[in-house]
Amino acid sequence: MRVFVAGASGAIGRPLVAKLVAAGHEVTGTTRSEERAERIRAAGGRTAVVDVFDAETLRAAVLEAAPEVVVHQLTALPERLDFRDPETYAATNRVRTEGTRNLLDAALAAGARRVVCQSIAFAYRNEGGRVKSEDDPLEEDAPGTFGGALRALREMESMVLGTEGVEGLVLRYGFFYGPGTHYGPDGTTIADIRRRRMPVVGRGTGVFSFIHVDDAADATVAAVERGAPGVYNVTDDEPAAMKEWLPVAAEAAGAKRPLRAPVWLAKLVGGKEVGAFALELRGASNEKAKRELGWEPAHPSWRTGFREMLG
């Protein structure tokens, strides 16, 4: 099939292009940089150097590629997430709203039949069971800057799932780890863990679901090729509380055991979101994606995944 990947030079986009090409698909990938375009070509894809906010140029690029499937992997997160900064999510929020509208318009104009879109699996409402399925509601009243990010996220998902004329699939990925991510070997989160700047906050009961970027790319290939329209959690098999995974990540990174911090101090230093994530975050079940997409993560647990990545 002809596949158009918006955000082909990102953390998932890079392995995704290579995996799509290996599966026999004809891939066109976007980037805003000519330097990064060369990496896409090296992986076997064609390139379109274009900004998603330039609707006319984007439309022309999609029309030229004539894709059957469009994959939305665009984000604009900073290298370091600072929840105290009101602009932390601003660029990504615009990508998820205005950028998604532009991409969907271009996909419809080109006659694409399917759109696969990146979302997140750590936006479920912080109540009830600790591990959520796709049928559970998303959070509506998150504190601080994350609340604005969730509003943009819901708008993006609604557009993808509700646009007539295309099959919309939303992939809610867990926290990425692997090359090019915040939890990667050179990522800022792992750097903070090594410096003991990421403590277990309070009781550390917030549940995190992780996914290696290679596994996320494999699930995306599966969603390109098959599966009914709808929402799929793309996570590993072991949702885990902060108090469980953080010491393991620290050991794998060669760091001392994480410190512990009271909730009030964590909120003061890191923002309100830190307390909510550390105590109330819900994990996500990957059963639907495994069952309906025929996908299995090659890294079924962050326990071995972190050790392999950081060892």
Image (tube, rainbow, N blue to C red):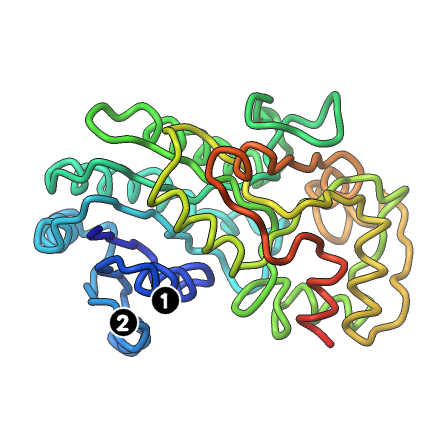
Q: Amino acid at mark 2?
A: Gly
Is the Cβ of the residue at disc 1 closer than 8 Å to that at disc 2?
yes
Write down the residue under mark 2: 44
Q: Quadrant of residue 140?
A: top right
Residue 216, position as x, y percentages in the image: 50, 53
Secondary element under disc 2, as helix, strand or loop, is loop
Q: CA distance from mark 1 to mark 2?
A: 7 Å
Q: Secondary structure at mark 1?
A: helix
Left or right: 147 as drawn, with respect to 20: right
Residue at position x 25%, y 67% from top? 45
Instruction: Tell me where residue 150 appears, x and y as whole percent.
Output: 52, 34
> What residue sits 39% from the left and 42% below the top?
223
User: Residue 18: which disc?
Assistant: 1
Asked if residue 130 lies left or right of residue 32, the reply is: right
Residue 13 picture quarter: bottom left
**110 on left or right of 71:** left
Crowd around label 2: few <14 · some 14–19 · many ≥20 (10 Å): some
> Which circle's residue, 1 or 2, is located before the other in the chain?
1
Residue plotted at (70% across, 73% down): 310
